[in-house]
Structures are given as C-alpha cells and as structure tokens.
Amino acid sequence: MPGSSAGDLVSVVIATYNMGRYLPQAVQSVLGQSYANLDLQIVDDGSTDDTPSILRRWDGHPRVRTYSQANAGKARAMNQGVALSGGSFIAFLDADDVWFPEKLSRQMPLFAARSEVGVVYSDYERMDGEGAPLPKGPTHLHRGRVSGPLLIENFVPYSTGVVRRACFERIGGFDETLRMGLDYDLWLRLSAHCQFDFIPAPTARYRIWAGQMSKNHRQRYQSGIRSMQNFLERNPGAVDQALVRSAWAHTYTGRGNVMLWREKDRRAALRDYLRALSFRPAYWPAWRAMLRSLVTTRAP
C-alpha cells in the first residue's frame, strides 16, 4: 500500500435514519475539522422524520453531498456513501455522534508514518441524549496485527475509525446481510489484511440514548458470533487456538450475562455459561457468573 501525506482527501460517510434531532451536530463537527481536505457524504436510509428537510440545509455546499434511498439498512447506506465518495481515505461517523475539531489532523499523520497501517482509530468519550458527559471505563487499545485481541472484544469505536480506501475495497465493504454489529465485522475482516494504529486520546463523543439500535444486546451478540465464525472460517490459522478458545469463552459468558441481567432468562444464561466452559473449563468469569446466577438475576 502506498504511503500517505497529511493532506490526502478524506471522505467522511454518515448514514442516517430518523436522526434529524442529532444530524446537524454531527455534520457541523465534520465541517468544523481543522483538517481541511475532506468531503462529506450523507446517505438518508428512508427516514420518516424531518431528516429530508434538514438535509436541504447543505444543498450546494461545496464539501457535502446528500443522497436518499429507500430503507435498506445501515450497511447498504454506508456502502452507498463510500461509492459516492472519492477520497483515498474513508472515515465513519454515526449521525448521533460528534467529532472533536482536531480528530483528523491527529489521526492522518499515522498513515504517513507507516504504509502498512490500514486503520487508525482512537479512544472516545460518552454523552447522553442531551450532550451531557457520561462516565466511561478505560478502553484497551491495540496496534499492529490485532485479529486476536479483536476476537476477545471490539475495542475500535466506530465513529473514530479512518480506513485506507484500498483496504476497504479489498474486503468488499460492509456486509449488507447484517443488521447490527457492522463495525465489528468490518474491523475483523480488515484485521486479516492490514495493521491498525490509534490515538490514545479521545477524538469523538459517543451518544447513549433511549432510541439507539445498539441497545438490542441479544441481536448484537448474535451478529458478533456470526462475524467471529465467518472470520475464523475464512482465515484459518490467523489466530492461535488458545486465544480462539478464550475468545469464545469470553463471548458466551458475556451473552449469558445479557440473558441474565437484562432479560432475566436464567436458563438461557446457564446454557451460555456452560458453553463458555466447554471452550475453557477453568474460565473463572464463567464460573463466577454461573454461581452468581443461582442467587440473583441482578447485574453486579
């Protein structure tokens, strides 16, 4: 892959569905970047709120292009946005998140430093529906070849990621058969072909509010498990088997916790804890969760 200069064109893609409430803030955070050489593709995935009228604010803007499609899902909208763009690098932003002004200026030099880097991401902050800060624990970031750590946990926040276009096109873009977990699937597939790097400081704010799709935890786990299975089938030997077993133990313990704490389904949770232990019999988090489930369904 060729190297990069800090002046390369970055195409930013926002897919939006009924996010008229937050979309202007997201767009302004892109147009307010200190990194000047960017364009913005906004794809409306069949919104039924005031999004279509809001999009008219940017008619004729030299750096913004808008497109509307019949509702077909976020993956289709994101792929459409990439197809409309022309940058050598692609950056992603959810319509309810925002960027800090120096985001791209801080990230783009990492591509210039190492041509083998295909993805640059960062830490992030959290906010509520009104923009007030929310607490967040530490994010464990990794660089280089990251397939193993990614199998354990998705540590790449979607709205912080910037990707070389050549890498994105090599893997075929977002999987349009998925309804959730699109970013995790993308990062896993990219990890088989390029290195990752990161900025340790936050460059984006992730919004947590009642209407976001990501609160469907059961479906997120189902999508994540499918992405893990697909990755391992397509990349045999890419990750050490001991780490693969740890990844499955971690995943099924996590899903068991969701079944127990959020859906109060003790039987489903126990099935998942036992499934986790089938991969790693001495996996203490699964034993601890299973023993706790016999006493309460409340989250610790």
Image (cartoon, rainbow, N blue to C red):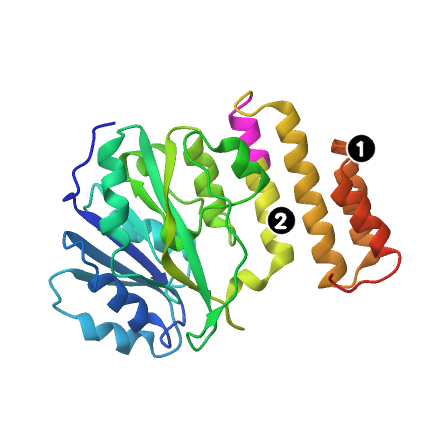
Q: Residues within 10 Å of mark 2 (few under 14, many from 20)?
A: few
Residue holding disc 1: 281
Which residue shows up at 34% across the image and 49% down it?
79
- Residue 99 position in % (x across, y down): 32, 61
The reply to whether the magenta stretch includes residue 66 is: no
**Could you tell which of marks 2 and 1 lies nearer the N-terminus?**
2
Disc 1 marks a residue whose amino acid type is Pro
**Toward the viewer: 265 or 277?**
277
Which region shows up in magenta?
A: 229-236
The answer to whether 264 appears left or right of 247 in the picture is: right
Which residue shows up at 44% across the image and 33% down it?
191
What kind of element bears circle 2? helix
Disc 2 marks a residue whose amino acid type is Gln
Q: Quadrant of residue 165?
A: top left
**In terms of secondary structure, what is the magenta stretch mainly?**
helix
Residue holding disc 2: 222
The reply to whether the magenta stretch includes residue 235 is: yes
